[in-house]
Image (spheres, rainbow, N blue to C red):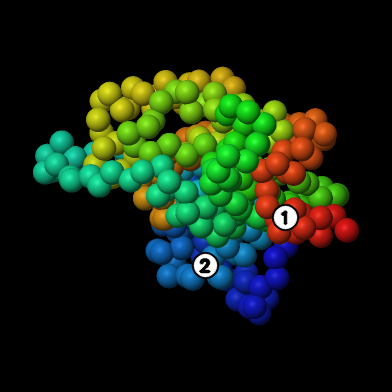
Amino acid sequence: MPDLPLAHNDVSEKQEQLIAKIKEKGGHAGNVTLRLELGWDEETYWPIRDRLVDSGLLELGRGRGGSVSLVTQVPPVQPNTESASSSSPPISVQRISEGELYDPVAEVLRKQWARDLRFRSHVVEVTARQGRRDTGGTWTRPDIVTAALRVFPHVPGKFFDLITFEIKPFDGIDVTAVFEALSHRRAATQAYVWLHVPAGEESNDDLIALLKRIEEEASRHGVGMIVGADPSDYSSWDLRLRAARFEPDPESLNEFIAQQLSGLARDELAQWFR
């Protein structure tokens, strides 16, 4: 369990506060909501949450910014998804290009997302900007790659993950994103599509139908799906599907790391297993 800069009594009290808050929410709540309503900073919230997960009292869930549920027989209360947007004035949406999404998405992956997934060590690199360098052919170059090391309190050993992300701007959302992500999984443990849907656009009927089709296709192939309104705000990221984990051929994985990651990243990975 993570070390906490708190006395034992303080830790126990805060664990009780967090559980009480989740019960107040019906047994299920988002990380962002819990942290804000409790008035805790991130350095307090995450270690307390992780201790409760390790103790088997909470389980991780999906949703914007990640979520947790009490491990009980009481079904969690689903958030009210009814929107009042139909009576609201139209919102002017600023279009963001794919290239403009890379850095803010990578920064959130590096910080809040990695913390939510409890990585022991991790490296995040934007791999889309490699010019004409040979990376193996069509659809073999992900937009962003995360290499991560995880350990679990009740399972011996270290676990290595190589996670790819295919980023799509609002005007580039298409079901082919799933097949691009799928092509990366030949040498990655998990693959995701990250789709930008600006606030104010999520109630569009055509878009809803398209996202449903993409989600169905992604689910069929074990590809993860994240829909984000603001690439730099983790609380706006909606995890629609968690990617299935696969064990790629070690030789393909090694070749992928050599082709896609920088020398600095490869050096850091080597340190993890020395």
Residue with the most extreme right position: 274
* Whole-percent x, y for residue 127 in the image: 58, 45
- Residue situated in front as seen by the camera: 270 or 43: 270
Please tell me which residue lies in front, 102 or 247.
102
Mark 1 near mark 2, Cβ–Cβ under 8 Å? no
Pointer 2 local density, CA inside 10 Å: few below 14, some 14–19, many at least 20? some
- Whether residue 174 is visible here, answered yes or no, is yes
Residue at which label 1 appears: 263
Q: Amino acid at mark 1?
A: Gly
What is the x, y in percent for residue 149? 73, 52
**Vertical position of residue 99 compared to residue 1: above or below:** above
The residue type indicated by label 2 comes to: Glu
Q: Give how far across and how far down residue 171 sits, in percent.
A: 32, 34
User: Is 205 positioned to the left or the right of 114 in the image?
Assistant: left
Q: Which secondary structure, mark 1?
A: helix
Specify few, some or many for label 1: CA neighbours under 10 Å numbering under 14, 14-19, or 20 or more: few
**Element carrying mark 2:** helix
- Identify residue for label 2: 42
